[in-house]
Amino acid sequence: MQDERIDPAALAAFLERLSAEILERGDWGKVADYIPELAAIDPAQFAISVALADGTLVSAGADRVPFSIQSVSKVFTLACVLGRQGGQIWQRVGREPSGSRFDSILLLELERGKPRNPFINAGAIVTTDALLEGREPKAALSEILTFLQSACEDVTVRIDPAVARSELETGFRNIALANYLKSYGNLRNPPELTLGTYFHQCAIEMTTRQLAQAGRVIAGLPGAPKILSVMNARRLNALMMTCGHYDGSGDFAYRVGLPGKSGVGGGILLIAPRRASIAIWSPGLNGYGNSQMGTFAAEQLARFTGWSSFG
Ligand code: GLN
C-alpha cells in the first residue's frame, strides 16, 4: 500500500501480521547488559504503535508494557533546551554524525571536549547540563517529564528510580565522559549532579502507545499539542535522521528512510513528518546498540506504507 492517507484498518492488519512474524522469527539480538536492571529483561518481546494524522492510534503486540526509553529521551531534552535557550546549545555541542559508538570517548579529546552531536552520550550529557543550569535536578527532570506528559497527554508517564540507580552504580563510561567534559570546561554543573539528572531522564518509562502519542509533536500531526515550534521540530527530525542511531545512522536511513531515535532499552521513535509518529519496542539490540527487531519492523512499516523522507 503506497497511500499517504493510510487506511487504519489495513494498517492494523499489517501490524498484527508483522508482530506475529517477528515473534516467529525469534532473531532478537542481545539486551543491554551494562545496566543491570535492563540486563534482566526478556528480549523476546515486541510492540508497535502508530499515531496517524487523523488522530487514530493503531497498535500491535505488547503495546501497554512500559519500557525504559533511555536515549529516546535525548530528543525531548533537546526539545526543552531549544525551546528554552534557542541555538545557544550549539556552542557546546556539534550537529554532525559521530561515526562512533554511542558511548565513545574517542573524538572528545581530538575535538577538545565538544561532542559531535546531542544524541551520543557525551552530547546528551552536555544538553542535560544546559537544562540543569541554575536549578535543581528535580526542576530539570520535571520539565522533561512535563514536556513528555503534555506531548502524549498522559500524566502517568514516570521515571523508574530502580533503573536510574542501577545505571548510577555501573555507568562508569558516562562518569568518565562527564568528568572529561568537565575538564574541558563544557559542564557547568558538578558532574555528579548532571549525571544524576541524565540517568533519571534515561530511566523514564513509557509504553509504545504513549511514546507514539508523544512523537506527534515532532511529526507535526494536526491534533498534537502545540508545545514545539515548527522550526524546532524540523531541526529535531534532521538530527534524528543523521545522528539518531549513532554509527548505525546511515544504515538506518538507507533501510528505513525516516528520522528515528533509538535507545538501549530497545525503543525506537520513528517520525513520518505530517503523516505519523511511530513507537517500536523490542529489547534485544544489534551490534550498534539499536533494537534489532525494532529496526526490522521500521523497515517493513516504511515499505508497507510508502512513507519516506525522500519522496
Ligand atoms: N542511559 C544510557 C547510557 O547512557 C543511554 C544510552 C542509549 O540508550 N544508547 O548509556
Image (cartoon, rainbow, N blue to C red):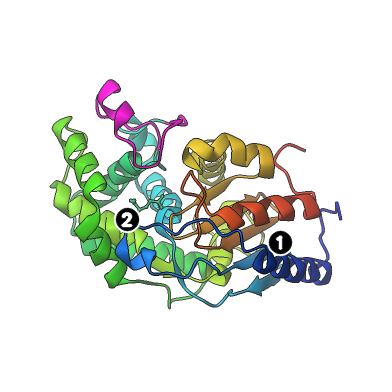
- Verify whether residue 115 appears in magenta: yes
Q: In percent of the image, x 48 and y 36: which residue is there?
A: 247
Report the magenta residues as a range. Answer: 95-117
Query: In which quadrant of the rendered view does residue 8 lie?
Result: bottom right
* Quadrant holding the C terminus: top right
Mark 2 Cβ and ligand 1 under 8 Å apart: yes
Quick check: can you spot residue 229?
Answer: no
Res. 174 in view: yes
160 lies left or right of 193: right
How crowded pointer 1 is (Cα within 10 Å; few <14, some 14-19, many 20+) is rated as many
Which badge, 1 or 2, comes first in the chain's sequence? 2
Is 190 placed left or right of 215 in the picture? left
The amino acid type of the residue labelled 2 equals Tyr
Question: What amino acid is labelled 1 in the image?
Answer: Ala
Q: Residues within 10 Å of mark 2 (few under 14, many from 20)?
A: some
* Marking on residue 34: 2
Q: Quadrant of residue 157?
A: bottom left
| Residue 203 horizontal/vertical position (percent) | 35, 64
Residue 240 is covered by the magenta coloring = no
